[in-house]
Amino acid sequence: MKKLLNTLYVSTQGTYLARDGENVLVKVEREVKARFPIHTIGSIICFGVVNASPPLMQLCSQRGVALSFLTENGRFMASVHGESSGNVLLRREQFRRADSEKQSLPIARNLVAAKVWNQRSVLQRALRDHGTGESEDGWLNVEKATNRLQYSPPSAAKAKSLAVLRGIEGEAASTYFGCFDRLITAQKESFVFTTRSRRPPLDNVNALLSFIYVLLARDVASACEANGLDSSVGFLHRDRPGRRSLAMDLMEELRPHLADRLALSLINRRQVGPTSFHMTESGAVEITDSARKDILIAWQDKKREEIRHPFLKEKVPIGLIPHCQALLLARYLRDDYDAYPAFLWKG
């Protein structure tokens, strides 16, 4: 259980939420663990086996507090809202800004600047952990890429259009992935990375990255829905049938720290190996069923780790970072902040 800003996150399995007058009671095994006045809460997000009493649902409905239920792994299931909800106003504002490139651009700039910042942080961490600076072992290329990437976030912050911004993002991605292979320090014969291939992934590294990106996208989409946002209407990624554009927007800044570093750890710690993958007749590389289970376990373990959120200045589980960012975006759209506070990881 954790309260961030005005959102209460409940993740202890078997928790029961009840009403006591104008208060929310948090009970575990019939013992009251916490009590929150309803006027201090904007929304409640429940993970897994967490139950709420009908009187509490009525109280939340009357006070405009969104009550959302997700699986333990973070998949969105449902939200309970009253007759009038602030979410409709939030979504209308989201749609208005998404329809205007001028209003989309400030959000998109921060997303791309944060993504490149975090990519550079991944390279800097690798240099500190492994790099020698000697050209013969490739670390000099990583150092050069790190130096080049320092200019991309300021450029992204000043981009005059979404087209220019996407160009900056693409150039930074080319620089980042251009030295990504050097970050792989084990099993080099089975894990060679030359370029990013998506549909389909053509090697073991790309297959692993794509699978973890899918897990991250699912969690970010659930975070958007739980915080009253439409996961399909984005600012950097434009509308397309079947695409969760806002989820893709918000996951950009989270990919380097949450997904890329996990993929590297799985390879370098030999938690996946050459037998974890197989090639189909079409040439696509897929992950075996048993390896998928191992990766899912590693993903859930990763989400339980705690870090200090750079904006909120509080320790939070990594699994709550998508919810923090969705919440911060919602508050920006409500004009609580002058700018969207993107996630900046200091490696």
Image: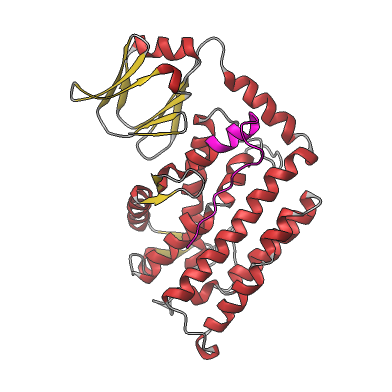
Coordinates of residue 263 in the picture (x, y in percent): 44, 62
Q: Residue at (47%, 80%) from the top-left corner?
A: 131
Q: Residue at (47%, 67%) from the top-left corner?
A: 204
Range of the magenta residues? Answer: 327-347
Coordinates of residue 108 in the picture (x, y in percent): 69, 47
Asked where in the image residue 15 lies, by quadrant, the reply is: top left
Seen from the viewer's position, the closer of residues 109 and 34 is 34
The kind of secondary structure the magenta stretch mainly shows is loop
In the image, is 183 to the left or to the right of 233? left
Q: Residue at (64%, 67%) from the top-left corner?
A: 150
Q: Is residue 285 at all visible to an observer of this figure?
A: no
User: From what the image shows, is residue 16 above or below residue 346?
Assistant: above
Coordinates of residue 66 in the picture (x, y in percent): 48, 21
In the image, is 31 to the left or to the right of 283? left
User: From what the image shows, is residue 129 above or below residue 236?
Assistant: below
Outermost residue toward the bottom in this view: 136
User: From what the image shows, is residue 21 above or below residue 168?
Assistant: above
Is residue 342 a member of the stretch shown in magenta? yes
User: From what the image shows, is residue 140 above or below residue 278?
Assistant: below
Q: Is residue 331 at all visible to an observer of this figure?
A: yes
In the image, is 31 to the left or to the right of 119? left
